[in-house]
Image: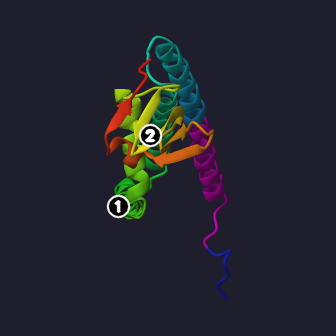
């Protein structure tokens, strides 16, 4: 009568345990090294942004994007080390990105318009502007919308596609 014990060799368990421990240790080394490298790059980015005149929102976006990309590269290295077929993962991300991009096209349009506003500076916080037929003082500029305050103290929130896609009159350029 055959059982699951047939063909069992205790030395196989030792070999498998050794390989698993080796992989776990190497993965821990990769994670610690990646965290150290990313912290150094994070520090260097902070120092770099101290000397630039970019908008704070844009600086934060660039900073977070670079750090996130570094973590994605680390994840890719770990997956390759574990023997995962990275081509299939990348292809899945490509298809998923297309679907998400199509579903979020308006949001992504606002995001892209927000980037253009933050890079080109047609107005700054505190400027009196007319955007999309709305007069007000610029109170907030972020990646998805721009907030104005009219003379009555009303808050006007405009999606950035309406801001960047229309004429902008800046009455008070700082």
The stretch drawn in magenta includes residue 20: yes
Where are the magenta residues, as a range?
A: 7-28
The residue closer to the viewer here, 42 or 37, is 42
Q: Please tell me the numbered disc located at residue 98.
A: 1
Is 122 above or below relative to 82? Answer: above
Q: Residues within 10 Å of mark 1 (few under 14, many from 20)?
A: few
Residue 81 appears in the figure = no
Disc 1 versus disc 2: distance between alpha carbons? 20 Å
* Quarter of the figure with the N terminus: bottom right
Residue 100 appears at what percent x and percent y? 42, 61
Residue 51 seen in the current view: yes
Magenta residues, dominant SS class:
helix
Taking depth in this image into account, of 83 and 5 the one nearest to the observer is: 83
Q: Residue furthest front?
A: 152
How many other residues sit within 10 Å of disc 2, few (<14), some (14-19) or many (≥20)?
few
- Residue 43, compared with residue 77, is above or below; it is above
Which residue sits at x=47%, y=36%? 65
Q: Is residue 38 above or below residue 149?
A: above
Q: Secondary structure at mark 1?
A: helix
Q: Residue 73's x, y, as percent?
A: 44, 40
* The image quarter in which residue 7 lies: bottom right
In the picture, measured across the screen, residue 72 lies left or right of residue 3, that is left
Residue holding disc 2: 73
Question: Viewer-proximal residue, 81 or 130?
Answer: 130
Color scheme of the displayed model: rainbow
Whichever of callouts 1 and 2 sits on the residue coming sooner in the sequence is 2
């Amino acid at each position: 009568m055959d059982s699951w014990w047939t063909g069992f060799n205790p030395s196989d368990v030792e070999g498998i345990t050794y390989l698993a421990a080796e992989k776990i240790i190497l993965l821990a080394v990769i994670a610690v090294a990646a965290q150290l490298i990313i912290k150094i790059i994070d520090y260097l980015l902070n120092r770099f942004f101290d000397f630039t005149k970019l908008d704070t929102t844009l600086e934060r976006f660039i900073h977070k994007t670079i750090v996130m990309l570094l973590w994605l590269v680390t994840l890719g290295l770990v997956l390759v080390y574990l023997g995962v077929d990275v081509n299939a993962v990348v292809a899945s991300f490509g298809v998923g990105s297309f679907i998400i991009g199509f579903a979020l096209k308006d949001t992504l349009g606002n995001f892209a318009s927000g980037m253009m506003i933050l890079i080109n500076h047609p107005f700054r916080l505190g400027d009196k502007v007319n955007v999309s037929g709305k007069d007000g003082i610029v109170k907030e500029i972020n990646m998805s919308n721009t907030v104005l305050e009219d003379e009555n103290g009303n808050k006007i929130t405009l999606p950035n596609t309406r801001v960047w896609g229309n004429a902008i009159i800046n009455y008070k350029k700082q």
